[in-house]
Image (tube, rainbow, N blue to C red):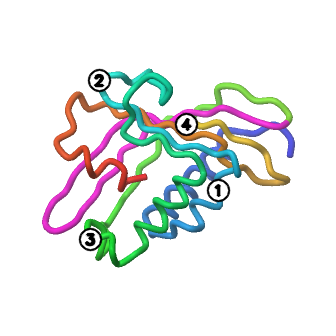
Amino acid sequence: MTDLTRANVEDFLYAETALLDEWQLEDWLALFTPDGSYQIPCNDDPGGSGDSSLMLVDDNRLRLTSRVERLQSRKAHREYPHSNLRHFVTNVRILDQDAESATATCSLMIGRFRANREIWYCGRADYALVRTGESLAIRRKRVTLDMTTLRHASDVALIL
């Protein structure tokens, strides 16, 4: 693969969020590298790391796999039946790239609709992407939420 373009990264991010919106979580999980990670820091410490700060989500590949299995189970009462999700991706930028990897960022708006409730989340997603042949994979995804309070903090982990 030659140099990535913004359009290449946008297409990848659109495909990623479509998998989430369609609850194809196993296919979404397959986008991560074996050493992949997913983080959402607390909104009072957006620069925090799992080593020294409380995180809303700090999953390695094993924990991501467990999360996907739990969310797809009928025992996940908070998500059975599934919420309707809608991810909006905009302002995609490639920050850096070399022959094997790239870092990218985008703005996100995510709506979650369930049981006559709607919850909106806004923020930024930062990605460490690696090239896998003619495609990309996620080595690290970090979502930093813009809200100063989270009325439904327990639901954040459900939006992936």
Mark 1 residue type: Leu
Residue at the far left in the pictured view: 116
Is 109 included in the stretch rendered in magenta? yes
Work out how far the residue at label 3 is from the one at label 1, CA to CA, in angstroms: 26 Å
Mark 4 residue type: Val
Mark 3 residue type: His
User: Dot 4 lies on which element?
Assistant: strand
Work out how far the residue at label 2 is from the one at label 4, CA to CA, in angstroms: 25 Å
- Mark number displayed over residue 77: 3
Q: Which residues are magenta?
A: 100-126
Upstream in the sequence, badge 2 or badge 3?
A: 2
Circle 2 is placed at which residue position?
44
Circle 1 is placed at which residue position?
31
Asked if residue 31 is positioned above or below residue 49 in the image, the reply reads below
Identify which residue is drawn at 33% across, 75% down.
Answer: 75
Asked if residue 43 is positioned above or below residue 60 in the image, the reply reads above
Circle 4 is placed at which residue position?
92
Upstream in the sequence, badge 1 or badge 2?
A: 1
Mark 2 residue type: Asp
Upstream in the sequence, badge 2 or badge 4?
A: 2
